[in-house]
């Protein structure tokens, strides 16, 4: 058997036939290696939706590779081989390298520090060095981010984002930002009126084909006790489906995306969001093509600037920014706990069985679809965990488990940094804290809830509102040093001792689980 020249490793979130690792690929000399590893679904308690999405998209990509004539070594979870019996990607690769004996092992930069270490180690054991190509999917490199960050005391999205708008000439006119402003944040916070959102365009769905059905059956039997359900599985799992989802978003949702970006409504998971994060994170779509299509829709007069800018900021701004944070701060980042939070995540985060209507809504749809939009993640589930004082590592494990778009490079900084303030302000200028009235104002289901968002104390007090004041009291000294928290902290000083005591008593009852779980 002729030995392989280049063995290209492809992970489940690298499903791009044009990735840099394929540059110069020779079908006579080179081969591709992919593996489904049990550990990838169990190192956190991965939801059925998330496992299915990854496995189905990988198997479809394997078919695309074979169709393009590339030699592929692929291990399915349900193979009977000795390699399939090994738990981790690293162990599988190590064993395969002993028989495949490639001259070089090449891959595109991965999205998970832990997996990267495993693969590097396995290649080293074989006496080779893992060659890593830049991921062209992103606008920036980690080096770009590091040089932007160097010498800055704190990192803020806004400056990074403006630099990128200029460098890539996106939404720019004569060297100035289109519309004369860098951002339209203030126009992106409109709530639906009392009548609600009315008719929202239907979610773009993709009927599971035979291959996806096979994966669904495998996941339902092998991961039967994992969270969530698969009845509604309809995510794009191929490049052509992802392109269709992008086009449908632009045609149907983008015009109102900006206006209702932060809005909530009970029983409405999809609203005007794009639902493209999983397709982008698997690399079925490139960030460049998504941004270009959205800018083109604005230039063609199809979408207002507030929508195009709001959307592009999420991708060119936040998405690139969190990736930079992850790769410049790991591995110590995952251990940070600046607020010394020690509580356990309530068990009903895994079932949705809570009597708080907003949390029940967000968690139930998360388990059903593997999806929640940003404000639900940040200001419903994330806010509750932050106010309760849950250990950020537990919150991180939950977010990494339940969402179809969860890959550590993007999930961890959003959870530990932005949502839980675990990095003490590296990522966000202040903790995102609010009372239940914020949720109510943005359209949360407070009317149908047994609690009252306006109440801080007593049996009907909204747990968010109680815990918000408790949070300010517990962290008063630290927060007083933050200029952006000054006003909020001053309000604590206006409380009487008995008010403070009532808040503490109720917050303790919430922490003991006497409030919040469904009866
Ligand atoms: P849209 O609202 O349509 O936004 C458009 C795109 O912008 C998204 O598809 C996504 O690619 C990008 N984007 C938006 N916000 C962010 C952000 N804060 N960081 C990075 N990219 C962003 N996003 C993930 O892709 N994976 C995660 O695991 C993830 N975990 C999160 C955990 C927490 C606690 C929070 C607060 C946010 C998290 N996000 C994560 C960011 C964001 O919530 C999701 O990208 C978004 O909800 C996905 O839905 P969508 O595609 O409909 O997004
Ligand atoms: Fe959520 Fe509080 Fe509103 Fe109930 S009252 S839905 S717990 S914010």
Image (spheres, rainbow, N blue to C red):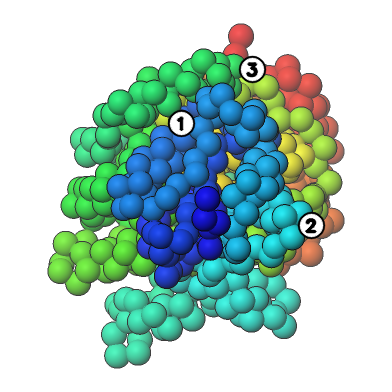
Residue 191 at x, y percent in the picture: 37, 46
Farthest-out residue, front: 1
Residues at marks 1 and 2, CA–CA distance in whole angstroms: 30 Å
Asked whether the beta carbons under mark 1 and mark 2 sit within 8 Å of each other, the answer is no
Query: Few, some or many C-alpha atoms within 10 Å of disc 3 (few <14, some 14-19, many ≥20)?
Result: some
Residue located beneath label 2 in the image:
332
Q: Report how many numbered discs are placed on residues in the image.
A: 3
Is 98 situated left or right of 73 in this image? right
Q: Nearer the viewer, residue 494 or 196?
A: 196
Q: Nearest to the eye among marks 1 and 2: give it.
A: 1
Where is residue 71? Give x, y as percent: 42, 50
141 is higher (above) or lower (below) than 105: below
The CA span between labels 3 and 1 is 29 Å
Q: Nearer the viewer, mark 2 or mark 3?
A: 2
Q: Residue at x 56, y 24 (%)?
A: 80
Answer whether residue 328 is visible to the viewer in this image.
Answer: yes
In the image, taking residue 379 as reference, residue 507 lies left or right, namely right
Viewer-nearest of labels 3 and 1?
1
Secondary structure beneath disc 2? helix
Q: Residue at x 62, y 54 (%)?
A: 101
Res 52 label: 1
Q: Residue at x 34, y 29 (%)?
A: 211
Q: Which residue is mark 3?
A: 517
**What residue is shown at x 64% (from left), y 49% (from top)?**
97
Question: Which is nearer the N-term, disc 1 or disc 2?
Answer: 1
């Amino acid at each position: 058997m002729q030995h392989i020249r280049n063995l290209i490793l492809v992970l489940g979130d690298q499903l791009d036939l044009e990735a840099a690792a394929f540059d110069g690929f020779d079908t006579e000399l080179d081969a591709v290696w992919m593996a489904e590893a049990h550990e990838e679904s169990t190192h956190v308690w991965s939801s059925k939706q998330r496992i299915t999405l990854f496995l189905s998209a990988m198997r479809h990509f394997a078919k695309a590779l074979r169709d393009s004539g590339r030699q592929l070594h692929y291990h399915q979870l349900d193979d009977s081989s000795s390699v399939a019996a090994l738990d981790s990607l690293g162990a599988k690769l190590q064993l395969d390298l002993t028989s495949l004996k490639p001259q070089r092992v090449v891959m595109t930069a991965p999205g998970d520090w832990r997996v990267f270490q495993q693969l590097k180690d396995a290649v080293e054991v074989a006496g080779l060095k893992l060659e890593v190509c830049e991921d062209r999917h992103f606008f920036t490199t980690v080096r770009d981010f590091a040089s932007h960050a160097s010498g800055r005391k704190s990192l803020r999205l806004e400056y990074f984002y403006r630099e990128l708008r200029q460098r890539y000439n996106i939404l720019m006119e004569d060297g100035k930002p289109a519309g004369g402003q860098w951002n339209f944040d203030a126009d992106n916070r409109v709530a639906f009126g009392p009548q609600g959102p009315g008719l929202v365009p239907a979610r773009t769905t993709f009927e599971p084909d035979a291959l996806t059905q096979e994966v669904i059956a495998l996941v339902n039997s092998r991961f039967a006790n994992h969270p969530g359900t698969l009845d509604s599985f309809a995510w794009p799992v191929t490049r052509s489906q992802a392109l269709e989802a992008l086009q449908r978003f632009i045609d149907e949702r983008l015009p109102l995306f900006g206006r209702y970006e932060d809005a909530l409504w009970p029983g409405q998971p999809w609203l005007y969001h794009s639902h493209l994060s999983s397709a982008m994170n698997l690399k079925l779509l490139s960030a460049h093509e998504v941004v270009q299509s959205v800018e083109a829709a604005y230039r063609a007069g199809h979408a207002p600037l507030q929508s195009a800018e709001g959307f592009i900021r999420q991708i060119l701004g936040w998405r690139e920014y969190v990736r930079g944070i992850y790769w410049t701060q790991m591995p110590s980042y995952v251990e940070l706990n600046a607020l010394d939070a020690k509580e356990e995540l309530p068990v009903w985060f895994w079932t949705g069985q809570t009597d708080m209507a907003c949390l029940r809504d967000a968690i139930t749809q998360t388990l059903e679809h593997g999806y929640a939009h940003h404000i639900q993640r940040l200001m419903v589930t994330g806010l509750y965990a932050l106010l309760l004082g849950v250990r950020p590592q537990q919150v991180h494990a939950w977010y990494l488990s339940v969402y179809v778009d969860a890959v550590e490079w993007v999930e961890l900084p959003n959870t530990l940094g932005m949502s839980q303030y675990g990095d003490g302000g590296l990522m966000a200028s202040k903790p995102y804290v609010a009372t239940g009235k914020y949720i109510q104002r943005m359209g949360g289901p407070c009317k149908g809830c047994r609690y009252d968002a306006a109440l801080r104390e007593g049996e009907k007090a909204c747990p968010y509102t109680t815990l918000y004041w408790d949070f300010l009291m517990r962290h008063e000294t630290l927060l007083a040093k933050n200029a952006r928290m000054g006003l909020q902290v001053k309000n604590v000083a206006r409380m009487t001792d008995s008010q403070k005591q009532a808040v503490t008593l109720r917050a303790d009852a919430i922490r003991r689980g006497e409030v919040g779980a469904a009866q």
